[in-house]
Image (spheres, rainbow, N blue to C red):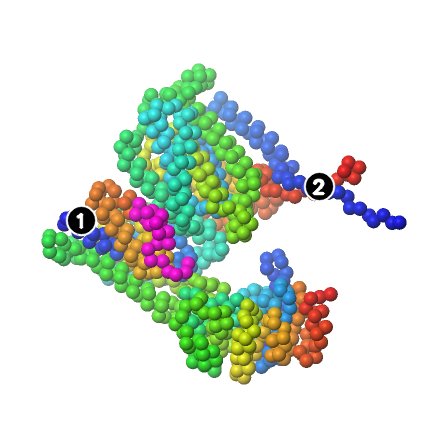
Amino acid sequence: MAGWIEAVIQGVLLGGLYALFAAGLSLMFGVMRLVNLAHGDLIVLAAFAILIVATKLGLDPFVAVLVAMPILFAVGFALQHVLLNRTLGRDLLPPLLVTFGLSIIIQNGLLQTFSADSQRLRSGVIETASIPLGGGIAVGVVPLLTLLSAITVIVLLNFIFYRTPIGRAFRATSDDLEVAQLMGVDHRRIFAAAMGLAFVVIAIAALYLGLRANFDPTIGPARLLYAFEAVIIGGLGSFWGTLAGGIVLGLAQTIGARIDPEWQILAGHLAFLAVLVVRPRGLFPRAQD
Amino acid sequence: MDDAPTKPAQSFRIETASGTSRIAASIAILIVLVLALLPVFAGRTLIQDFIFLFYMVALAQCWNLLAGYAGLISVGQQAFVGLGGYLLFALMLIGGLNPLLAIPLAGAISALFALPTALIVFRLSGAYFAIGTWVVAEVYRLVFAQVKPLGGGTGTSLTPSATSSVPGLEWVKALLDVRTPAARDIISYWVALALVVATLAAVYFILRSRRGLALGAIRDQESAASGLGVDIYRIKLAVYVATAAMTGMIGALIYLQKARISPDAAFSVLDWTAYVIFIVVIGGIGTMEGPVIGAIIFYLMQRYLADFGAWYLILLGTLGILIMLFAPRGLWGLILNWRDVTIFPIRRRLAIRAVDEKRA
Amino acid sequence: MPLLETRNLAAFYGDFQALYGIDTTLEKGETIAIIGANGAGKSTFLKSIAGLIHGAADSVLLDGVPIGARPAAEIVKLGIALVPEGRRLFPSLTVEENLLIGRYGRKAPGPWTLARVQALFPILRERRSSATPTLSGGQQQMVAIGRALMSNPRILLCDEISLGLAPIIIADIYAALPQIKAEGTSVVLVEQDIVQAMKVADRVYCFQEGRLSLTGHPRDLTRDQIHRAYFGT
């Protein structure tokens, strides 16, 4: 019995990580209808960036991520402004194929620069610390922090989207690009700002990715799939939905792993397909879209 | 009394063939004949290279039919390549079938798998559909990694008895004076040639049919096509299942020739999707000529640059992005801009001719 | 110098030419009406001024300054606001948020504050937290006009604000026009409802298949003239 309770708790905490992965994707799609096939690889890229900052400056990863965030915001802003803005339009193919190409470039660029070796973000004692809950069950501090960070990020994103002028601009641009321009919204800069913001979220996701487990240049695509599944399970258009979707996915994986460790990832995929069949719009979709 | 001048009677016909395409058809038949005779005077390496070229052209035509015509952008076709490969191994190793039977059967079974797959994945659209197909391919990979009789996670090889069960092996060995492995390659070569010709023919006839006209309409303006009564869902489903069957057969051939299969190789996104997409994009999406050109270019790049490993892939990715941004209709598109030429005559023209009154 | 002038304005949708050599002027404080049949190019004309369609730089002049090639987001900053055809409110924003975003690009000082706009159309305060799709057509039109006013424009472009609305609602909306004019805003009205347009306009332009077919003061134009200009011969 304790094993099952443990699996549920681990599932929820894992869901926090997946929600962090998914939040950036959700943001990109929410504002500019961009599905970024390089999303997972960007998380891995950010993890390497944090690693470099941490090792070169001798910083703890939690501090290194704060240093990396403004840099990554600028990178995201530039990427959107220079490259991705050119691909957005009525045709679906260009953004898909360009981000697919980007994915391959990032993976192989990282391979070339860092080799295929596994890496890890080291943070000392906190890595193995845990909080006992009684009954022999303990909760890791890092996984708990992941979930709390995910919740914080989602609260902040909701605040930005629903209580600030730029959030209104995000929503308006997503609704009707042409009329948003009539309001004086420069959509190219808005998209770039949204991408910059998404990169900040990606940085946070990368921090916890690197703290929780080993990472190497090739694990990007799998993270993209988890992020995507979390967004779809949760339902489009809602950040809280994305959190729910991440948790459902995390639960499916840990419960599947409890049945047979080799089935962990497959269980997650199957849960996603099941939701797709039964509730194609996701568990908590927004009214429109 | 004045006779009002009468307009000559007119006849209307839909034509697809053009002058260039008629010439191209004759040349094509010649090329196929030459290719069929290639094993007589070509070495083993060249044969293997051509097998690679043939199946990449075939895969590219299938992906192009899906994405360029039906608007279904899939990054999960590796599901059917791997499925076809595994079905071939299962049919040969467990079912004891000879490969020339197993290959079409693998295609048919792939189509059966494609049907429920489509019903699930069609609930998504656009870019989400793309990633959904990728998830499905991952499911196939993970499931096959659990199938112990076919090698599980590490995969398996075709047994010598299986590989020597290829029909016509002895005949080829005697006729061309080669040993068994080379003879197997030669037969694989002919099968690959037959498959690529069949794929080209199938795609060509689909696009020439009334369904093909509908596909063109869907590609250009889906909502308008829907308004005209085109049953979009059923057409897309039919195209998806048809390409799954063709892709499954191609996958079966690929793994017949490789004689060794593993889940990671059979369901590889890089080999069966990334490279295929690159081929279609560089050649020209939405045309039949494009994938052929793209495959030839890719083959040359693979041959001379693949040793550069990660740099080669970075180059491919960069090239793909540049083409998508600056020449979105690919190389064939650039050629078309320069001169309106068609090799595969699938575009329809309305030909109006005045009919001689005496014959009317 | 007129406040707004178009000179030889042409507009294309791809290869299709929708406007041919349109010459118009708008004086400060004027209200001009653009009438014409469907497809005559009236909306295209407004979109060209608003920057949604780009043309030659000197085909549109604001205070003598060429603005014909500037993008829409810049044009609104210069003080030209468009109430687009079909309202086109933002469904993800509430009524109040729709109004507030009107001030996003141009935060110019002026009489039109949120409170003032809500006073002009009281329903905007009543339903300020509502989602816009739940409003009636007339109410949505009021939001659209209010949204454009929030940027305190010097020129207000209105594209068929009476479209699809019952006569009594149209009258309500047009009742707001005098207050807008009183604040000194110049107005360009594109209208299918000729009667309503002629009542409020100082001058009229009639479009026919992308060209100007008639211009003049409403009181100087006969029904016959208008009929011919509207439908062509």
Q: Splitting the image into 4 quarters, where does residue A247 fall?
A: bottom left
* Residue linked to disc 1: A4
Kind of residue at badge 1: Trp
Percent x, y for residue B10?
A: 73, 43
C27 is within the stretch colored magenta: no
- Tell me which segment is drawn in magenta: A269-289
* Residue linked to disc 2: B11
Q: In this view, does C140 lie to the left or right of C25?
A: left
Percent x, y for residue C124?
A: 44, 76
Chain ID at mark 2: B
Which residue is at the front of the view, A200 or A59?
A: A200
Q: Please report the residue visible at 45 percent of the width from the left and 81 percent of the height from the top.
A: C119
Q: Is residue A117 above or below residue B192?
A: below
Kind of residue at badge 2: Ser
Disc 2/disc 1 C-alpha distance (Å): 77 Å
Which residue is at the front of the view, A108 or A180?
A: A180
Q: Splitting the image into 4 quarters, where does residue B265 fall?
A: top left
Residue B205 seen in render: yes
A284 is within the stretch colored magenta: yes
Residue C144 seen in render: no
Assign a secondary structure to mark 1: helix
Q: Is residue C182 above or below residue B60?
A: below
